[in-house]
Image: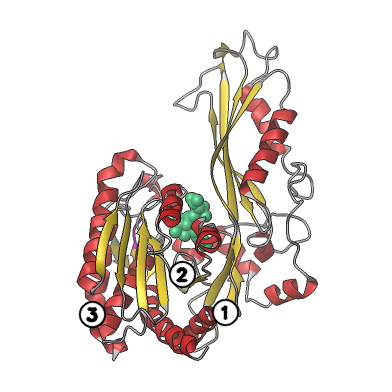
Amino acid sequence: MMKNYISENQDRFIQELLDMLRIPSVSADPKFKNDVLRTADFVAGKLTEAGADKVEICVTGGYPIVYGEKIVDPQLPTVLVYGHYDVQPADPYELWDSPPFEPVVKHEKIYARGASDDKGQMYMHVKAFEVMMQHNALPCNVKFMIEGEEEVGSDNLGTFVKENKDRLQADVILISDTGMLANDVPSITTGLRGLSYVEVEVTGPNRDLHSGMYGGAVANPINILCRMIASLHDEHNRITIPGFYDNVVELSKEEREEMARAPFDLEKYKKALDLQEVHGEEGYVTMERTSIRPTLDVNGIWGGYTGEGAKTVIPSKAFAKISMRLVPNQSPEEITEKFTQHFERIAPKSVKVLVKPHHGGEPVVTPTNSIAYQAAAMAYEETFGIKPVPVRSGGSIPIVAMFKSELGIDSVLMGFGLDADAIHSPNESFGIFNFLKGIETIPLFFRNFAEMSKKR
Ligand code: BES
Ligand code: MN
Ligand code: MN
């Protein structure tokens, strides 16, 4: 039985994951280049060991994509598994209780950068594949495509997908890179927000100035930038960029009522974040604000003197990184353009403004009436004992919309993470329960999907 095999081998599964978590595969920082490459080797090795054929470390313009497949019979359906082996930077290091790349198991959780996003979740698929192979129970074809640039925008994966359409032919794309509501409230993610990301630079005087000699007479770019940023939201917490909401698909009353049925405890939510009050767009509840509504947030702001002690200076420049989360049918190009025009327009003549666009991504909503969704829902019902709830998520995986537009394939987002995993934060973790439940649930998805595809 597959379940017995998982419990007999769970310690080894965990040790292997810890080995991978020890490699600091931070794609954003070139200092970790060798480690990112080593992680690709690691994944390729484990896929081979588990029984994949044609395992290849595909060279791209950036970090490689690990590909592997097991074709049981070309007549059978094919599942394409996508995941990423790169991780976010671990900063700030001093806020970690144990070093981010020295994983520890504590309170039934694995603590390390990437534990949940996405090494732990991606590795569930490698182990689920091993389990099926060991039991001669792989019911259909499977292809793996594990990339190393998700956290930096997946630019090269886009090219890879366009150039490898035949090799990537599949009936469904299976991804574990999202979360679920709670360990006793399984859920399947049915939507992801898009992203428009920009960096802005505000320049005042051509050099840093003595703030006593010049203060009051020239524009301070930090003061100006703060005022400009503050003006991007109105008193209802709506975004003030003209046309920002133009293409936003509003949900019907029925759809919003349906959404409200997913369990959510506002008091718990506030307590977990140590907040007196939540904040957001007027007229929408928290779950809506983080899924079906677009947002604008400053991710970083800097300029002037931030070292020890005091320095009396009017800086020449101020900077900020700003992200906008998008919903159907907003397009990242259009929003970036609207932001740029607006930001340039609201700048006073006393400063110069430069807007640099970064990566972006399209929002996506996945179907719940497909065979693949039903197969996933039945798998969760079997392993968790209750039906999973469909929920739209606030995060972004830009490649998912491209899988649909370029390959014509829908994704099923079987995420096993929790909000408490603190992905992208210090002390990221992944529950052992979640890791093992994933390994147990994935083969059932394969079985159901193969079975239900036959009947069509
Ligand atoms: N796995 C996350 C996306 C995610 C997290 C979706 C939680 C749903 C729930 C992914 O690795 C990620 O962090 N994506 C980035 C976008 C990317 C372009 C940097 C994000 O959402 O900020
Ligand atoms: Mn991820
Ligand atoms: Mn991430």
- Circle 3 crowding by C-alpha within 10 Å: few under 14, some 14–19, many from 20: few
Q: Is residue 57 above or below residue 345?
A: below
Q: Which residue is mark 3?
A: 9
Would you identify the image quadrant in which residue 16 lies?
A: bottom left
Instruction: Read off the magenta span.
Output: 111-115
Is the magenta region chiefly helix, strand or loop?
A: loop
Image mark for residue 173: 2
Q: Which residue, given by chain and number where applicable, does mark 1 sit on?
A: 370
- Dividing the picture into quadrants, the one containing residue 10 is bottom left
Q: Nearer the viewer, residue 9 or 371?
A: 371
Magenta residue check for 112: yes
Viewer-nearest of discs 2 and 3: 2
Residue type beneath disc 2:
Ile
The percent coordinates of residue 390 (x first, y second) are 59, 75
**Amino acid identity at mark 3:** Asn
Work out whether 399 lies above or below 89: below
Residue 61 at x, y = what percent? 36, 44
CA–CA distance in space, label 2 to label 1: 12 Å
| Sequence-first tag of 2 and 1 | 2
Gap between marks 1 and 3 measured at Cα:
33 Å
Residue 415: image x %, image y %?
Answer: 47, 70
